[in-house]
């Protein structure tokens, strides 16, 4: 694809409502389910009805090329796949495939910040003015709590015309991630902090900068020391370039009648950084959300603040059931019970990671195309229905 045409398709990639979803149609390989051996080995029983739902999701005209869902209960994991993780080879998705986790990266920045709160190095009442005095004075009253809950009012840098102009010209442009807020530094707050909810990529950039300011450490090193190591994550990283570690789940844009386009490495990650740049695997994403959404990673006092929810405020895209917003985490109230988690979307990928409140069970659900409320909303509605059915299987199964 010519650079100019690619730029037109990708220019809104980093905003909360971006790009088009892919559909694969007749190119799909046969769907399949695979048992993932747990520590004791063996292949857990697969639910035929759940598998059929994935098969139908992939087979529909606007469906994703492939899907992988992991249901983990204690030390047992069931792996469901349909379609392909790589059109060229026909290889199915795998639990250890690297993939862009999109806005679930915001939960990682929340984990860093809240662990620093536990250590007494940050407070949820710390303000931008106190920790980042060089940021615009109009933003100085915004607190860490408001940033984590998307009630800050910070304008979204990823929608700024100057930012999009650079991205349009070169989707792989390497931004200085610590200067991303400069794109909206001349803008006032959108509303009085704490008065409204508005999902913004700027919030988690500011969170990461506050964490760096109080520690003197790079955000990437804080992720390693405060999140990856405690949770045993060895295949999770925050790259700034466009390359993905091998092997990876390929992400696609399909806009019929054009042929499917592999967009896995079409866009650099430096322009999303702490708001959406992390790369992980389905298996490690499950380990993360069980630790972060469960009681393992944070103290009881900090977790109580994390899990104070605003009813009706959704992740992007919305997760299964009824959504409510906590501090860099969302509550999904399904017909079968409550899960805590986060979702995300990026060119080629739509993600969900959720856990039971006790952290003993988790669901990760990944499709290798993008959908959100403004981009193929019918696909998102079908996806959320299937996700809720998987959530029920997680909550009810033994």
Image (cartoon, rainbow, N blue to C red):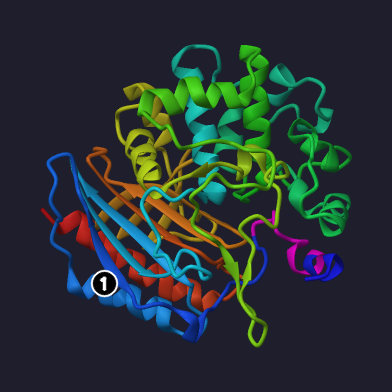
Q: Is residue 313 magenta?
A: no
Residue 175, percent across and down?
A: 79, 40
Above or below for 380 versus 105? below
Nearest the camera: 212 or 265? 265
Q: Is residue 332 left or right of residue 191?
A: left
Q: Which residue is mark 1?
A: 51
Please tell me how crowded label 1 is: few (under 14), some (14-19), or many (20+) other residues with Cα within 10 Å.
Answer: many
Above or below for 35 versus 222? below
Residue 204, percent across and down?
A: 62, 37
Secondary element under disc 1, as helix, strand or loop, is: helix
The kind of secondary structure the magenta stretch mainly shows is loop
Q: Residue at x 60, y 27 (%)?
A: 220
Nearest the camera: 94 or 283? 94
Q: Residue at x 19, y 44 (%)?
A: 38
Nearest the camera: 130 or 268? 268
Q: Is residue 143 left or right of residue 9?
A: left
Q: Is residue 14 magenta?
A: yes
Write down the quadrant of residue 185 in the picture: top right
Above or below for 184 versus 97? above
Q: Is residue 178 left or right of residue 62?
A: right
Position of the N terminus, as image quadrant, is bottom right
Residue 125, percent across and down?
A: 58, 23
Query: Can residue 336 be seen by looking at this rendering?
Result: no
Q: Is residue 82 left or right of residue 124?
A: left
Residue 353, percent across and down?
A: 40, 50
Nearest the camera: 123 or 47? 47
Q: Residue at x 82, y 22 (%)?
A: 134
Query: Can residue 167 be seen by looking at this rendering?
Result: yes
Q: For the magenta stretch, what is the residue range?
A: 7-16
């Amino acid at each position: 694809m010519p650079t100019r045409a690619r730029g037109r398709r990708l220019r809104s990639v980093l905003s909360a409502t971006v790009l088009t979803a892919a559909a694969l149609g007749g190119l799909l390989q046969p769907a399949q389910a695979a048992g993932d051996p747990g520590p004791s080995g063996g292949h857990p029983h697969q639910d035929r009805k759940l598998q059929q739902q994935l098969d139908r999701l992939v087979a529909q005209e606007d469906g994703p090329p492939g899907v992988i869902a992991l249901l983990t209960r204690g030390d047992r994991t069931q792996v469901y796949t349909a379609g392909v993780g790589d059109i060229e080879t026909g290889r199915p998705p795998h639990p250890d495939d690297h993939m862009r986790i999109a806005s679930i990266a915001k939960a990682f920045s929340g984990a860093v910040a809240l662990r620093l709160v536990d250590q007494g190095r940050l407070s949820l009442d710390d303000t931008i003015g106190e920790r980042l005095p060089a940021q615009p004075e109009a933003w100085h009253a915004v607190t860490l709590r408001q940033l984590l809950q998307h009630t800050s009012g910070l304008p979204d840098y990823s929608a700024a015309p100057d930012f999009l102009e650079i991205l349009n010209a070169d989707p792989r442009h390497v931004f200085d991630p610590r200067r991303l807020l400069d794109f909206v530094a001349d803008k006032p707050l959108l509303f009085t902090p704490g008065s409204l909810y508005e999902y913004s990529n700027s919030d988690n950039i500011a969170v990461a900068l506050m964490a760096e300011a109080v520690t003197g450490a790079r955000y990437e090193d804080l992720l390693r020391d405060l999140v990856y190591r405690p949770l045993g994550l060895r295949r999770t990283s925050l790259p700034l370039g466009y390359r993905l570690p091998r092997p990876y789940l390929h992400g696609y844009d399909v806009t019929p009648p054009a042929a499917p386009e592999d967009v896995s490495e079409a866009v650099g990650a430096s322009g999303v950084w702490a708001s959406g740049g992390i790369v992980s695997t389905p298996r490690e994403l499950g380990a993360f959300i069980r630790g972060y959404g469960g009681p393992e990673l944070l103290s009881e006092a900090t977790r109580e603040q994390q899990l104070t929810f605003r009813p009706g405020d959704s992740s992007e895209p919305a997760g299964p059931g009824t959504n409510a917003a906590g501090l860099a985490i969302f509550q999904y109230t399904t017909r079968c019970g409550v899960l805590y988690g986060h979702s995300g979307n990026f060119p080629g990928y739509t993600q969900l990671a959720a856990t039971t409140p006790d952290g003993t069970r988790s669901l990760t659900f990944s499709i290798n195309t993008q959908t959100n409320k403004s981009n193929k909303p019918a696909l998102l509605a079908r996806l959320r229905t299937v996700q809720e059915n998987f959530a029920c299987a997680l909550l009810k199964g033994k």
